[in-house]
Amino acid sequence: MSSLHFTIIQTSLFWEDKGANLDKLGQKIRSIQEPTEIIVLPEMFNTGFSMQPEIMGETMEGPTVDWMRRLSAEKKAIITGSLIIEENGKYYNRLIWMLPNGQLGYYDKRHLFAFAGEDQHYTAGKKRLIASVKGWKINLQICYDLRFPVWARQQLNEETEKEYDVLLYVANWPEKRNHAWKTLLTARAIENQCFTIGVNRVGLDGHNIAHSGDSMVVGPLGEILYHCAYEEDIFHIRLQKEEVNNTRERFPFWKDADDFTIL
């Protein structure tokens, strides 16, 4: 039986204070006693949702990526979350997928939140990142990407296998739109017949915008396996690959899906 252990960290964040955030998150990660394979942090976990990349940005050789590398090796677990990365004079809201051996992958947020001016400060990504762990495939996305179902939609390869088993979003999603967050996480799980995980922050940010968390794990039939609002939480869950496989076999709706290409 193929299983995968996730640890979700729903936390408040210190506004644009990297040292305080890394100290706090380091303590939370080191406190984990349960066996885990993937530890998930929110979007821009070291700063909050900052529109000051010129001040808050780092390179891939900077202190936060190094912090992730050291903690991942220490805990012998993958650590993932997004931060502000500067590269060739451009700034990205970049999700880092850090492996315990020090290797990493990354995904640059495709859909920039123009409502808050993110598109004025950051460069959009162009490629999806689907990570592989123990035979599982995990599609990694960031916050506002959740509103765009085509970007997440399963596509079939030549062997008619689905692209991924888990869809994961890290976020700084505000409380006043939490109904959309919860609804869309459930919709993405149902339409893609996969586990969907959303990890959000709690508390007020530097603009006095409230975040309710509402981190969730949703099963492939849309069933809510975990939900937490307003409180900081560290939650562990073991997902079973057979649940995804059985759902797709019992309800082969994917066979009727439209073919499409993302340009």
Image (tube, helix red, strand yellow):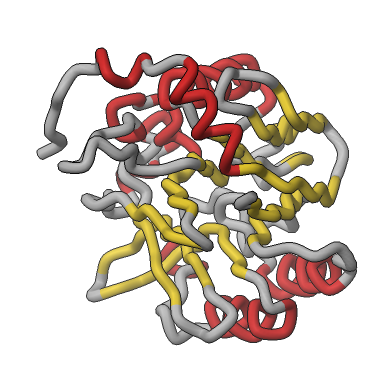
Q: Is residue 118 visible?
A: yes
Which residue lies at the image location 40% right of the left edge and 43% below the top edge?
164
Which residue lies at the image location 49% right of the left edge and 66% below the top edge?
97
Q: Is residue 157 above or below residue 219?
A: below
Q: Quadrant of residue 146?
A: top left
Which residue lies at the image location 58% right of the left edge and 38% below the top edge?
242
Q: Position of residue 24 (x, y in %)?
A: 81, 67
**In front here: 63 or 207?**
63
Q: Is residue 228 left or right of residue 45?
A: right
Q: Position of residue 213 (x, y in %)?
A: 73, 35
Q: Is residue 139 left or right of residue 151?
A: right
Q: Position of residue 258 (x, y in %)?
A: 19, 18
Q: Is residue 10 above or below residue 73?
A: above
Q: Is residue 100 left or right of residue 194?
A: right
Which residue lies at the image location 65% right of the left edge and 84% below the top edge?
73
Quadrant where the C terminus lies? top left
Q: How many marks?
A: 0
Q: Is residue 256 left or right of residue 230?
A: left
Q: Is residue 27 above or below residue 95?
A: below
Q: Is residue 189 above or below residue 25?
A: above
Q: Is residue 211 visible?
A: no
